[in-house]
Amino acid sequence: MPRFTVIVPAYQVQAYLSECLDSVLSQSCPDLELIVVDDCSPDACGAIADEYAARDARVRVVHLPENQGLGRARNAGMARAAGDYLLFLDSDDTLTPDALRAIADRIKETDEPDVLVFDYARAFWTGETVRNQAAAHLTEQGPAPFRLADRPGLLRVLMVAWNKAYRREFVEERGFAFPPGYYEDTPWTFPTLMAAESVATLDRVCVRYRQRRRGNILGTTSRRHFDVFEQYERVFAYVERHPELDVWRAELFGRMIDHYVTVLTRRDRLPRGSRAEFLRRARAHHRRYRVPGARVPARSRLRHTLVRFGLHRTFGALRLAAALRRRALLHAQGLTRALRAGALRLHYRIQLRLPLRADHAVFGAQEGPGGGPGALEEAFRTHAPHIRTAWIARPEHQHAVPPGPRRLRPGTAACWTALARSKYLVHDGHFGPGVRKRRGQVFVQTEQGTPLGHRGLDLQERPAAAAGTDFEELLRAVDQWDHVLSGNRHTTLTWERVYPGRYTTLEYGSPRNDVFQHATSADVARLRASLGVPEGAVAVLYAPAHRDHRRTQRPLLDLERMQRLLGPRFVVLDRSPAPRAASRADGGRIIDVSGHPDVASLCLASDALLTDYASLMFDYACLDRPIVVHTGDWDTYAATRGVYFDLRAFPPGAVAAGEDELIDVFATGRWRDPGSGRLRAAFRERFCPYDDGRAAERVVRRVVLGETRGLPAFVPLAERRPVPSAAAAAPRSPLVTVPRPSSPRTVTESL
């Protein structure tokens, strides 16, 4: 019995069918059967399907003797399905890479739900890809599985069959089947979701929904669009047969009216002269299925009123008036923005013609004050006190600006004045479009640490990671750089290739890591106390990398299970992009630090780092504290982001591919054994050769004071004394050592 049955009905899609089938058969989860239903297609669809079946035993082909339509073709496929879960895929759409693996993992995580809802993206014939606008309803945060009553917003996600996986036994027990006609998904998806005892979501794009330039069935003008009335009659008939679902009548009624209005207002669906008839039938359904006293959202009241009274001409007139009003409002708003922007541009141009202020420097950072720019700003005030500094920070970051520099808000006249007249510009990204570096200004680019994942021009082949990056604008920004900071040879070689420009690379170390050499044991104790780390505990900082291919950053590890198995001696500082919900079950041993403004403080407060592919590992190595790497989805990360070297072959410490193995690493002490220390020493030698606590000072002396000789000499790695962790500084205690489980099976069974 395969895990999945993927059913693909095929009719007049010979140009797209091979791509569709390849997307299924190439999945990293091979435990599937693929049923292709040839709906008596007049083109080569049947022959193409037979060729695939001859090559791959997982493919089965059903040839229907006559064309029966999409719904009945799916039924024919279901009748032959043997998989645990059913998936439907239209023959011109495709599965995204690793989609079935992600679906399988999520099904396992959520205890085999009746229905799993996942996301999709519209793939336009122009090459543009746009994710589902209702993706927020697919968040994986919160309890799972759940009932539809717990997350009614799921009914706002596109009601189609192909963005869900259905437990086959659930479908067979309830006798669900597709009806004939257009909009056949409607009487399938609403009942399955309402009847499901357990539902889960997967916030990941699993289907590319092809938007064809021509040939989309629902985009053709035909009276068959009147089938939508029969489909909703089937939905309400199902509710009448199941009184326990009566609570959904009001929601179904609202969706029905919205659907009717959508069909009515699309110019390419209803034949000329049929709109009045369509509106009359919609009015009849409004009277028949309306729930007295049900609340209608404000945004839908006008449409419901017009359908209720069948006001065809009024409907058209109001649509025209609303369109004109929207245009006028947008024009007025655009004019206001344009006037303000024009005034600021004029102000900026005037400031560009005024003399530079040689004693002014302005700083900015993508994630708020801190990091490399923050360390340099402090070094400016220490080693070049004649320079007046200013920070450009968004309102939410204003509180994090240190007391010394002047505070500026982006987009204000004061901000543009500082950008136009300050001699020194320092940032770890860019100050935004429109900024022009004038003659005499010096731009220092600090960047954001040592790269493992691809950056710069290398992202051109990684659309998920590029996220719409304007590479021409990026190169224009690079042309403004005078100095780029680097902490090691690997970084230097990478920056000069992916950011080609005329700048000078200053391979002096990373200023943001200077704090690790200056902090004291008293600082560590103070930081641990402020975070609530119990005395004598081993604090593990968990900092995973951002997953570019996921809109919602769901937890990758079960931290509660991990902490429970390791016992009270371990505390986890959770800096996940999507931290788990607060729970009393962990006894306060998992501390949410996702919103902490200073990651360097978290590093100092911890005894070890647990990460996967975050560049923080290169900074943390400067502390010479244990690092554990979790590589459970290395192949996916490498495929979507791209990597510069195989971290598994050159790690900074112990490596674990799975959760149980990770627990074993900590339980047996491998996280801090001599073998781990040797790996860390080699890693530090390669990536931390210059991080001796004086990187920011070297930059200021070179860039501001003009010193090219006599810069502080680099302290050899063997002579550096970074502040030790609390666990390393304290005498060995029972809290630091965990008894080794007898086997990996022991770890699992202890649950």
Image (cartoon, helix red, strand yellow):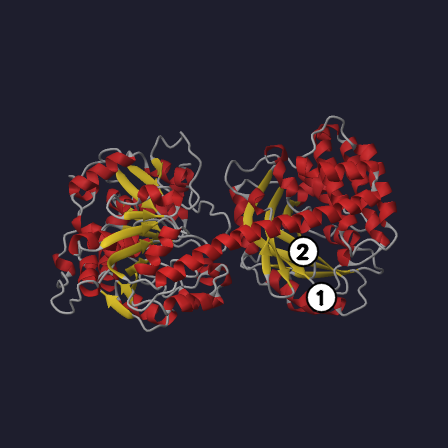
What residue does disc 2 label?
A: 89
Q: What amino acid is at disc 2? A: Leu
**Can residue 472 be seen at all in this image of the molecule?**
yes
Q: Pointer 1 and pointer 2: residues touching (CB < 8 Å)?
A: no
For the point 39% across and 44% down, the residue is: 395
Q: Earlier in the sequence, mark 1 or mark 2?
A: 1
Foreground mark, 1 or 2, reads: 2
Q: What amino acid is at disc 1? A: Ala
What residue does disc 1 label?
A: 49
Say left or right for 498 vs 339. Answer: left
For the point 42% across and 41% down, the residue is: 579
Residue 717: x and y, percent?
16, 59
Kindly state the secondary structure of the residue where label 1 is placed: helix
| Label 1 Cα neighbours within 10 Å, binned few <14 / some 14-19 / many ≥20 | many
Relative to 281, does residue 491 appear above or below in the rendering? Answer: below
For the point 32% across and 35% down, the residue is: 567
Which quarter of the rendering shows the C terminus?
top left
| Label 2 Cα neighbours within 10 Å, binned few <14 / some 14-19 / many ≥20 | many
Residue 57: x and y, percent?
65, 63
Count of marks overlaid on the render: 2
- Judging depth in this view, the residue of 299 and 81 nearest the camera is 299
